């Protein structure tokens, strides 16, 4: 009797375990879903490894993705202002140093401009040198390649008032080039990793391009000899080894007629020698005395 009760209790436990245990496919699906979401998030935030789609006819390469250079950063302070937009003018305070020895090679506080007077000239100090004003933040168009790639892309996503520390590998800094040492600049050796502390102060619109003055109505464009300022470009510039094709939209210019050959000078005709004059004949003969 005890054996029968034991067998019945064992069978009931087995049934309950089968009902509560997930199937193999469900477990695999559940485990794959977080990984898929993490990969999608990594692709959207630029993290590594990168998840990518394939065009038709291409196959996925097995193995581990590798990177040549890794740009990283740490947010010292997240700004509370608007997020900076690419293609606008960013005003930043910064300090940069070499990662190998901590030597500061650039600081925004070292870039001061002379004070200007009402006449537009620098104000001179007691030492007969221009008086320097307060330092001004660096202004650059973000995302257009004016600065080294590590700095240009490392500030992406910052908000106004935020501070960030950038860790820039040498491949995204000055590469194999070396900046020489100067009196006011310690220099940067080739293949130097750099570190920057950056603070975003302001973001403004790009300045409008300068407007070229329009010629007055009815004014004829100035034209000059080819290669001179104001010369009209040739509609069909000559190409080496190819004949110049005339412009069909303009009437073909007729060549000027060649000048007539000069006629040989005729020899001067000798003039007729003057005839001796004869005294006039009187109609009446003289009378004799």
Image: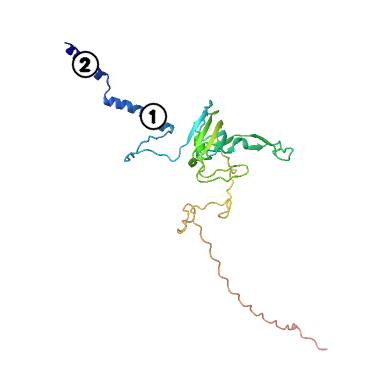
Secondary structure at numbered mark 1: helix
Q: Name the residue tied to disc 2.
A: 10
Residue 207 makes an appearance in the image: no
Relative side of 104 to 1, left or right: right
Disc number for residue 209: none
Q: Name the residue tied to disc 1.
A: 38
Residue 133 makes an appearance in the image: yes
Secondary structure at numbered mark 2: helix
Q: Residue at x 20, y 14 (%)?
A: 6
Q: What crowding class fits label 1: few (fewer than 14 Cα within 10 Å), some (14-19), or many (20 or more)? A: few
Q: Quadrant of residue 110?
A: top right
The extreme front residue here reads: 2
Q: Depth check: 12 or 279 in front?
A: 12
Position of residue 100 relative to residue 200, above or below, is below
Q: Position of residue 22 (x, y in %)?
A: 28, 22
Label 1 and label 2: CA atoms lie apart by: 42 Å
Q: Residue at x 48, y 34 (%)?
A: 72
């Amino acid at each position: 009797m005890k054996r029968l009760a034991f067998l019945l209790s064992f069978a009931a436990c087995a049934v309950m375990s089968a009902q509560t245990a997930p199937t193999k496919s469900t477990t695999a699906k559940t485990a794959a879903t977080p990984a898929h979401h993490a990969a999608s998030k990594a692709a959207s935030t630029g993290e590594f490894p990168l998840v990518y789609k394939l065009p038709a006819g291409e196959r996925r390469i097995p193995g581990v993705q590798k990177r040549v250079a890794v740009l990283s950063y740490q947010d010292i302070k997240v700004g509370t202002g608007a997020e900076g937009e690419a293609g606008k003018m960013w005003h930043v305070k910064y300090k940069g140093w070499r990662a190998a020895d901590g030597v500061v090679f650039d600081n925004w506080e070292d870039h001061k401009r002379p004070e200007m007077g009402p006449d537009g000239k620098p104000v001179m100090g007691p030492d007969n040198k221009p008086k320097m004003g307060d330092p001004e933040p660096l202004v650059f168009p973000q995302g257009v390649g004016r600065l080294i790639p590590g700095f240009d892309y490392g500030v992406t996503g910052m908000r106004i008032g935020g501070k960030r520390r950038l860790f820039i590998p040498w491949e995204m800094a000055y590469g194999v080039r070396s900046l020489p040492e100067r009196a006011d600049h310690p220099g940067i050796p080739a293949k130097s990793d750099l570190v920057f502390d950056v603070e975003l102060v302001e973001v403004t619109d790009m300045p409008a391009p300068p407007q070229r003055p329009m010629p007055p109505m009815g004014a004829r464009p100035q034209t000059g000899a080819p290669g001179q300022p104001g010369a009209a470009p040739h509609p069909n510039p000559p190409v080496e080894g190819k004949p110049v094709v005339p412009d069909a939209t303009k009437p073909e210019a007729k060549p000027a007629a060649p000048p007539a050959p000069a006629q040989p000078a005729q020899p001067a005709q000798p003039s007729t020698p003057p005839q001796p004059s004869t005294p006039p004949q009187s109609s009446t003969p003289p009378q004799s005395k």
